Amino acid sequence: MTSTTSQNLFDSLQMGDLTLKNRAVLAPLTRGRAGDARLATPVMAEYYRQRAGAGLLITEAAAVSQRGNAWVGTPGIYTGEQAESWEQVVEAAHSKGSRIFLQLWFGGRASHSNILDGELPVAPSAIAIDGEGVHTKQGKVPHEVPRALETDEIPGIVQDYLSAAKLAHLAGFDGVEVHSANGYLLDQFLQSKTNKRADEYGGNVENRFRLLREVIAAISTVFASNRIGVRFSPNGVFNDMGSQDYRETVLYAAGELGRMDLAYLHVLDGLGFGFHELGTPVTLAEIREVYTGMLMGNCGYELDTAQQAIASGAADAIAFGRPFISNPDLLDRFQNGWPLADSDPETWFGGDMQGTAYTDFPAYQA
C-alpha cells in the first residue's frame, strides 16, 4: 500500500521498492516506428530520454510474441535481438533519473492475418471487431473473425508473457506493465462482450479474470510483484469494447489485483479515448474503494485536474499521453506555467521517421 500524504504532482512517490522523482508518468503511446524487425531504435531511445522528466516512463506497447503483433512497425520483446535493442532505451531513461517499465502486449482479435504471416488472429471467442478495419502493409483491410483459442492452447499464451518478461528483465527494465485494456487480448478475455467461452476461462467474472491472474503469476517469477503494473480501460470503446457488466467486472478485477502487491493499477478513467455510454463512467474513487495499492489515472488530464486527483487521494500518480507528444519538457512547462505546444493527430501512430519521430519538438524557450 502506498502513502497519499504527499499532495502534489511534483512530489516524489514510493512505488514498491522504487522511488519516483515525481508523480507524473509518461503514458504508453502505441507507435509504428520500430521497422520490420520490430527493434527499438536510437531515435526511440532519444524520444524517451527527452521525456524523462516524468518519474516513470511506460513504453509503447511491445508484443510478447510474433502472434501477439497487432500493428505494422510496432516493437516486440520476443527475441534476444529485440531485448538487446531495448537496452539503449532503458539507459536513456536511467540517465535522467527516471524509472522505466515495458508494456507487454498481445493484440488478439485486433490483429490481422496480413500482420501474422497468414495466420488468423486468436481471441477468447470467434467474434470480429465491428470497426473501420486494420492498417496493414497492404493498406487498410476489414477486420477478420478471429480463431477462438482452444483451452489447451492458453498455457502457451501465458508462456509468451513469461518469456517476454524474462527478456524485459534481461534488457534492464525496472518493471513491466501488463496491457489489459483497449480491446487487446487480456481485455478481450476479461470482458463479457468478447468472451463467450464455456470453459474455465469464460462465463462468470472469476473465470474471465483467470488468464490475467495466470499471466501475473507467471511474470512474478521474473519480476517481483511490486515491479508489475496492470492497465485497465473500464469506460473505453476502442476496438469495439464495452460490456453491460463493465462496472462489476472492473471492480472485481481491481479487488483481486489489490491482493497481489502490485506496483500500480493504471486506469483510463478519462473519456477522451471514447466512452461506451452503457452507464455512468467508472471513477478512480470507486476503484480506490476496492484497490488500496498505488493507483494511476489517465486520459485527458490537465495540470489542474491531475493536482485535484492527487490532492483528493483518488490517485497517487497521473499518466499523461498526448500532451507529452509535442511537449517533451511537459513537467517543466507545468511547473513554470509555460504554454503547451500542439501536435498533428495524423502523425500520432505511424508514418515515416522524417518529422514524425517526435524527437524534433523543442523544449520551451523562456
Image (tube, grey):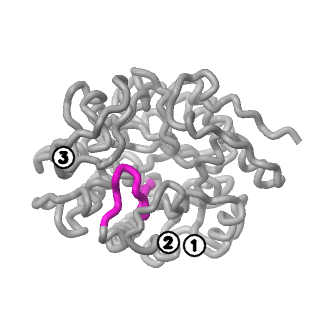
Q: Nearer the viewer, mark 3 or mark 2?
A: 2
Q: Magenta residues, as a range?
A: 229-243
Q: Earlier in the sequence, mark 3 or mark 2?
A: 3
Quarter of the image for residue 79 reads top left
The x and y percentages for residue 115 are 30, 29
**Residue 100 drawn above or below residue 206:** above
Question: What is the spatial separation of the Cα atoms under label 2 and label 1, in whole angstroms?
Answer: 9 Å
Q: Nearer the viewer, mark 2 or mark 1?
A: 2
Asked if the stretch drawn in magenta spans residue 91, the answer is: no
Q: Secondary structure at mark 3?
A: helix
The x and y percentages for residue 326 are 67, 40
- Give the residue at mark 3: 155
The type of residue carrying mark 3 is Pro
Residue at position x 89%, y 42% in the image: 366
Residue at position x 55%, y 68% in the image: 2
The x and y percentages for residue 59 are 51, 41
Q: Earlier in the sequence, mark 1 or mark 3?
A: 3
**Residue 114 drawn above or below residue 214:** above
Label 1 packing within 10 angstroms: few (<14), some (14-19), many (20+): many
Foreground residue among 295 and 121: 121
Q: Are marks 2 and 1 in contact (CB under 8 Å)?
A: yes
- Give the residue at mark 2: 283
Residue at position x 42%, y 76% in the image: 290
